[in-house]
């Protein structure tokens, strides 16, 4: 069985895309004085809550490129001190956190739409489904290996 050339390009292409899009996001959020880690945390809580366990949130954030367990803990303490999140065992957005999340969601959606509008929606949908499927398969493989 021959391996398609695109298999060999996949990882590097994905890594470059992630790096570039993260830099674009970082610069865009900086206009609002927000770091991506704050956005990631608020988005996880908003989309996986209410009642998202602190452990799940911490584990998800600590596995990102820019956070580890210590910096995740610092981030969550800061977000609590700023009145954006609350909860010991289960974390939720405060009213102010919800307002900030919705504001940032609109702020981030605009440049995302501008970028994606250059591509056919069917291609975007296929890419999203493919990446979700690859992620799920890789997670299953990791679980089997552990």
Image: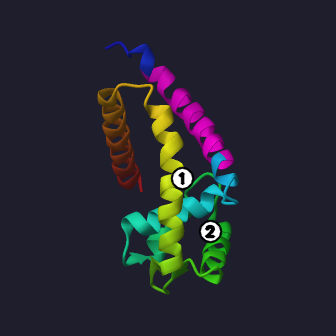
Label 2 residue SS: helix
39, 111: nearer the viewer: 111
- For label 1, the SS is helix
- Residue 54: image location, x then y, percent: 48, 77
Given residues 38 and 32, the one toward you in this image is 32
Regarding residue 58, the answer to whether it shows in the image is no
Q: Name the dominant secondary structure of the magenta segment.
A: helix
Q: Residues within 10 Å of mark 2 (few under 14, many from 20)?
A: many
Q: Is 18 covered by the magenta stretch?
A: yes
Name which of mark 1 and mark 2 comes first in the sequence. Answer: 2
In the depicted structure, whether residue 68 falls above or below residue 31: below
Measuring 61% from the left and 75% from the top, which residue is drawn there? 79
Q: In the picture, which quadrant includes the N terminus? A: top left
Distance in Å between CA atoms under marks 1 and 2: 24 Å
**Mark 1, other Cα within 10 Å: few <14 / some 14–19 / many ≥20:** some
- Answer left or right for 51 relative to 10: left
| Residue holding disc 1 | 107
Q: Which mark is residue 72?
A: 2
Report the span colored magenta.
7-27
Image coordinates of residue 125 in percent, x first then y, are 31, 35
Left or right of 85: which side holds 7?
Answer: left
Marker disc for residue 84: none
**Residue 114 coordinates in the image, percent (x, y):** 49, 35
Left or right of 71 on screen, residue 83: left
Please check the rendered image and state whether residue 55 is part of the magenta-colored stretch, yes or no. no
Specify whether residue 113 is in view: yes
Q: Quadrant of residue 119?
A: top left
Q: In which quadrant will I find the C terminus?
A: bottom left
Residue at the image point whose x is 42% and y is 67% from the top: 46
Disc 1 or disc 2, which is closer to the eye?
Answer: 1
Residue drawn at x 56%, y 28% as measured from the top left: 12
């Amino acid at each position: 069985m021959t391996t398609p050339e695109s298999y060999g390009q996949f990882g590097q292409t994905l890594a470059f895309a992630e790096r570039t899009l993260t830099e674009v996001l970082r610069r865009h959020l900086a206009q609002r004085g927000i770091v991506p880690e704050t956005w990631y945390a608020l988005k996880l809580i908003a989309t996986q809550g209410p009642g998202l366990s602190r452990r799940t949130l911490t584990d998800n954030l600590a596995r990102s490129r820019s956070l580890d367990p210590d910096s995740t803990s610092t981030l969550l303490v800061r977000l609590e001190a700023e009145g954006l999140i609350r909860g010991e065992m289960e974390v939720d957005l405060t009213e102010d956190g919800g307002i900030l999340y919705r504001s940032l969601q609109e702020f981030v959606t605009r440049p995302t739409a501008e970028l994606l509008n250059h591509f056919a929606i069917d291609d975007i949908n296929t890419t999203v489904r493919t990446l979700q499927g690859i992620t799920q398969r890789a997670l299953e493989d990791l679980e089997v290996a552990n």
